[in-house]
Image (cartoon, helix red, strand yellow):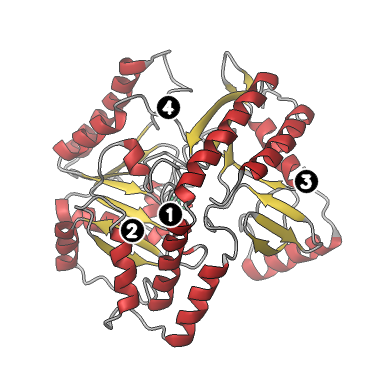
Amino acid sequence: MTIQHAPHIAALLARRDRLLGPDTPLFYDQPLHLVRGEGVWLWDHEGRRYLDVYNNVPSVGHCHPDVVAALARQAKTLNVHTRYLDETILNYADDLVRTFDPELSTVTFTCTGSEANDVALQMAQAVTGSTGLICTDTTYHGNTAAVSQLASVFTPVGGYKPHIRRIPSPDSYRVGAGLTGDALRDAYLSQLADAIASLQHAGLGVSAMLVCPIFANEGLPQPPDGFMEAAVKMVREAGGLYIADEVQSGFARTGEHMWGYRQAGPVPDIVTLGKPMGAGHPIGGVVSRRDHLVAYRRQFSYFNTFGGNPVSAAVGHEVLKVIQRERLLDNSREVGQYLRYGLRMLAQRHEVIGDIRGSGLFVGVELVSDRKARSPATQSARAIVNRLRERGILISRIGAHDNVLKLRPPLVFSREHADHLLTEMDATLTECQPNAG
Ligand SMILES: Cc1ncc(COP(=O)(O)O)c(C=O)c1O
């Protein structure tokens, strides 16, 4: 399908292609040229306003004045790196680790979520002496050579190495063989048992299971009860660690807890952080048990030139304080519940809505062309995302079939914003009838 673009957009696309190269990802059939943001709103080059129901990085709202001020203040004072004594970094680390369970008491700073996962993989290998890794079959955890091995939404350059085993993401909606309850849980666990046995048989051992505790990139499937507890127990019994990738699920996103792992159950051995941590400023981190960090540092003297520098620490600290001061955890829970209620009302009128799930302000709306057969309505999902963009609402889609609408606004999203979203979704769902695609 050839898409016509306005001259201004066509010129930017050509310039982008010339300077940044081909195949650099872009959202929407009609790409957006954004020039300003504030709170939950974004403006394009023509002054048109969009409700941001997608971006989790500016979780405290676009261009939050307190975060901007903290950044400017520290940038005017000092910016070096973590090889000097610095109280700005320590004050942030102190407040950050206090939000975790007590055993997760140390933090290692990085610049991105990918780097954080890379460090976590190295740490797990240093602790266990094993190299085998377990992840899900519909996932993405970052772009370094080691971490891209976990990706299933893209194939890593050079292909997959032999130390990766994938298990199906535990899904209670789109299940095989009509299983439910304990039988479904056990079916998923038996795939994990196979993965563990296969790694052991290959002589690789189990280094870690690395998963997002809410399975965000997998489309927010609801695991069968007891799955995570049993899965983590099995991994630990095999000598491996549980790494929770909180790059998407962390910092109050799920509304019930500051960290998604608390909702999932078991306390991880290692937690990785990114995206909303610096509201757009590049900072990520690895929160771990002290003995695990010691084992890693004994083997590799980790240093990151930019990671956790005083400006990044000042920004990260202010983001954390805003989340607490503005009670964004409560807002995420309350507005998330309100939004899901509104979506359930829409589902009574729109057959295309097969399932509504998620928690807090992270909501997945699975679209199906047949509710009984649960056939993925992938083309409808694409059309709806693009039509909503034309109507001034920004969302995206996820999941194995790309048929799950992804609603994940900044945490300052209010009931009024939810009402506006629901009104526009109602109109859009009426316009875009499902097809079998
Ligand atoms: C769950 C998860 N982990 C890690 C990453 C990688 O983070 P970054 O892009 O900051 O390297 C992503 C990015 O989309 C992600 O979704």
Mark 3 lies on a secondary structure that is helix
Query: In this image, 277 relative to 184: left or right?
Result: right
Query: In this image, 263 relative to 59: left or right?
Result: left
Does mark 1's beta carbon lie closer than 8 Å to ligand 1? yes
Q: Of the residues tagged 3 and 1, which is closer to the observer?
A: 3
Q: Is residue 242 visible?
A: yes
Among the two numbered marks 3 and 2 on one chain, the one whose residue lies closer to the N terminus: 2
Amino acid, disc 3: Glu
Does mark 2's beta carbon lie closer than 8 Å to ligand 1? no
Does mark 3's beta carbon lie closer than 8 Å to ligand 1? no
Amino acid, disc 2: Asp
Amino acid, disc 4: Asp
CB atoms of marks 2 and 1 within 8 Å: yes
- The percent position of residue 141, horizontal first and vertical second, equals 41, 50
- Which residue lies at the image location 14% right of the left edge and 67% below the top edge? 298
The residue identified by callout 2 is 118
Among the two numbered marks 1 and 4 on one chain, the one whose residue lies closer to the N terminus: 1
Q: Few, some or many C-alpha atoms within 10 Å of disc 1 (few <14, some 14-19, many ≥20)?
A: many
The residue identified by callout 1 is 142
- Which residue lies at the image location 58% right of the left edge and 13% below the top edge? 372
Among the two numbered marks 3 and 1 on one chain, the one whose residue lies closer to the N terminus: 1
Q: How far apart, in angstroms, are the residues tagged by discs 4 and 3?
A: 32 Å
Amino acid, disc 1: Gly
Q: Identify the residue at the far bottom of this view.
A: 77
The residue identified by callout 4 is 171
Q: Is residue 164 above or below residue 228?
A: below
Among the two numbered marks 4 and 2 on one chain, the one whose residue lies closer to the N terminus: 2
- The percent position of residue 401, horizontal first and vertical second, equals 55, 32
Residue 390: give its label. 3
Quadrant of image for the C terminus = top right
